[in-house]
Image (spheres, grey):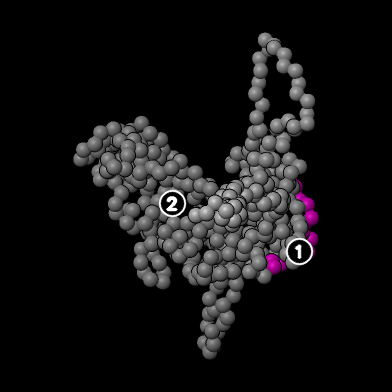
Amino acid sequence: MNDYNAPRYLAALLPVALLAACAHAPKKPAATPAPEPATVSAPAQASAAPAPVMQPAAPQRYTVKKGDTLWGISSMYLKDAWNWPDIWYANPSIKNPHLIYPGDVLILGYTQEGRPTLSVERNGQVVSEAPAAATLSSVVAANVAPTAAAPQAPVTMSNLPVAKLEPQIRYQALSDAVSTVPLEGLRPFLSKTRIISKSEMEDAGYLLQAEDSRPAMGADTQVYTRDLKPTEGTRYTIYHLGDKYVDPESGDTLGYEATYIGEATVKAWGDPQTAIITSTAQDARPGDRFLPQAGNGALDLSFPPHRPAKTVSGQIMAVLGGVAQIGQYDVVVLNRGSSTGVDPGTVLGIYRRGKKSDDNSVTLPTERSGTLMVFRSFDKASYAIVMQSSREIHLADVVANP
């Protein structure tokens, strides 16, 4: 290559080199706009469902009082208390946003579309609103860190004790929260008495006899049992089997009423096993069933009233508490449970089937006679409390979507 052509080639290669350098050079990130403040969205189902009917005298602000129930508060705002989730401004970062406490202030508002919403003010702050997770650290930093312009304080040594201050979370005990329904009359059915399925009953161990053959056994009695399993652990709850619940529609056995008797601990394995009854609510007797303990036995009563998730049609198959007629706040047993989508808080209407007319010429219409709410659900049956009644309620009355 001739020397006089070198400058010409260098001039041609220079733009290419510059382009390559620009391609590999780090790019300055584009400026991003500051995130918008977090806002609370209405419940997803609220946009799909029609606006709930409000009570004409629904208060703009209401201070929750000791003794209030979620059902009672719901009825204060809504014509149908089970529409409560449709107006509650739920914060998705709170595990159960329906928990409210005495002293909380409920605030009635409306969305841009005119839908009613409720939020709660606690200690002067609306707790249904929270900063977005992405900006939470910056909010905390703004509250606890000095700004760049602030002058640095001189450091002085002292022998006084130093306490490190950090942001802390205020909390209240779940037991202080407003219950969904009145608890009077429900306590025997909340966590002790229950319905056990046919398979649970057949698989459960049982009390054979007391060591000294006494017919009734209390606390601190040594007893012999059979069919307990080491894989279940050593701690058991004792139940007395009562009524068998038979589905009035299919004739299937749905379960057995199991009355709480007490607690027991296995001392020695074998056949029979040796156990000690550690506590009793009433005397244990031969044949009582032993079910392994699970959890702490606490029952969550903070669920909100709500419509069934799907179509439900069942019957009242028993009434508890020894009452002759079914009325408000009585406890009934339904032939529908969690396997059919009935969970705690499910609200159902009570309907009396139309009978034949006096001259037997026509069937009279089915009439609504009340409203109940499920407070404890098992696989194929559930406990419910009658919340409202407009006429007499009977066994075999129909329960269905309100």
Q: Is residue 289 left or right of residue 145?
A: left
Quadrant of the frame with the C terminus: bottom right
Other-residue count near label 2 (Cα within 10 Å), few / some / many at <14 / 14–19 / ≥20: many
Q: Nearer the viewer, residue 41 or 231?
A: 41
Q: Which residue is mark 1?
A: 112
Residue at 45% over, 60% down: 338
Q: Main secondary structure of the magenta part?
A: loop
Query: What secondary structure is marked by label 1?
Result: loop
Q: Position of residue 336 (x, y in %)?
A: 46, 64
How far apart are the alpha carbons under marks 2 and 1? 46 Å
Image height of 152 relative to 131, above or below? above
Residue at 64% over, 52% down: 91
Query: What secondary structure is marked by label 2?
Result: strand
User: Which quadrant of the figure has residue 305?
Assistant: bottom right
Q: Amino acid at mark 2?
A: Arg
Indicate yes or no whether the magenta region holds residue 55: yes
Q: Position of residue 58 (x, y in %)?
A: 77, 59
| Number of disc labels | 2
Q: Nearer the viewer, residue 270 or 139?
A: 139
Q: Which residue is mark 2?
A: 194
Q: Position of residue 351 (x, y in %)?
A: 56, 71
Q: Nearer the viewer, residue 18 or 73?
A: 18
Q: Amino acid at mark 1?
A: Gln
Residue at 25% over, 33% down: 268
Indicate yes or no whether the magenta region holds residue 12: no
